Amino acid sequence: MTDTAKLGSLDLRELTSQLASREPVPGGGSAAAFSGALAAALVGMVAELTLGPPAYAEHGDAMVAVRDRAAELRVELLDLAEADAAAYDAVVRARRLPKESDAERTDRATRLRAAMLEAARIPLSTARAAREVLDLAVRIAPIGNHNAVSDAGVAGLLAAAAVRGAVLNVRINLPYLPADEPLRREAAAEIAQLDGAAQQVLDEVLTAVDLQIEREA
């Protein structure tokens, strides 16, 4: 079983090898979070490249704010990638618990319920964080360094994929929650909003990117 606490320290070859294996973790939830972290890193890079050149001096304060928030979100999403793997690992372990006696069945049900709740809650947090990265991408695309505008576009694409990928992981886990679990109802409404907004904001990012590229052509 993968050491979920060390996912963030793997190099890219090791990480993709783990994702490609038969092990249940890491999976799509972690991949979505990593995509969001990559998007945040690109947003931070565009901000860094915009700071300094006199042509972009008027946007200096905005770039500092975007850069700093992107750095925070990058760390948060890397942590969520590990948390997602740990959450599903707990689900797998709970499902393997014995269920011969009443006491065992009760213990198994309690542990499984808690694990499934985390397995839905973590990707919801990932979707929220990735949505914020997407908002940073749409903010920076029209005013960032023209030479890095394609990077802002890639950031938008990765962030949107992170949102929608995380939403899929919430959706697949919600039906396993008890009918009286508040998250089951609350999350269903929120992920619908997040999913729809992701496409809308991505369209805005790509439109801004296209305009910048055409202006420089």
Image (cartoon, rainbow, N blue to C red):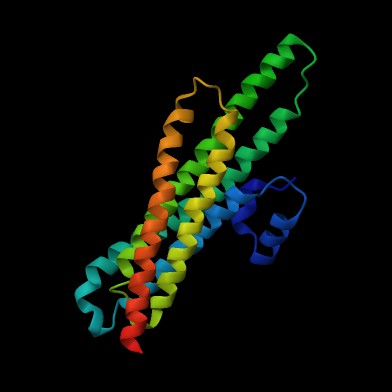
Tell me which corner region of the image, top left, top right, bottom left or bottom right, holds residue 43.
bottom left
Q: Which residue is drawn at the image coordinates 62% and 45% (left, top)?
A: 85
Tell me which corner region of the image, top left, top right, bottom left or bottom right, holds residue 61.
bottom left
Judge from the rendering whether residue 118 lies leftward or rightward of residue 69; answer left or right: right
> In the orientation shown, which residue stands out farthest toward the right?
100
**x%, y% of residue 135?**
35, 58
Quarter of the image where the N terminus is located: top right
Quarter of the image where the C terminus is located: bottom left
Residue 145 visible somewhere in the drawing: no
Tell me which corner region of the image, top left, top right, bottom left or bottom right, holds residue 203.
bottom left
138 in relation to 26, above or below: below
**x%, y% of residue 165?**
54, 51
**x%, y% of residue 98?**
78, 21
Q: Which residue is drawn at the image coordinates 58% and 44% (left, top)?
A: 84
> In the orientation shown, which residue stands out farthest toward the left?
58
Q: Which residue is drawn at the image coordinates 54% and 36% (left, top)?
A: 120
Q: Which residue is drawn at the image coordinates 46% and 59% (left, top)?
A: 159
Q: Count the numbered circles shown.
A: 0
> Of residues 122 and 192, which is closer to you in this image?
192
Judge from the rendering whether residue 15 lies leftward or rightward of residue 194; answer left or right: right
**x%, y% of residue 51?**
30, 76
> Of residues 9 and 111, which is closer to you in this image?
111
> In the orientation shown, which residue stands out farthest toward the bottom?
217
Residue 199 visible somewhere in the drawing: yes
Judge from the rendering whether residue 95 lies leftward or rightward of residue 161; answer left or right: right
Judge from the rendering whether residue 17 lies leftward or rightward of residue 205; answer left or right: right
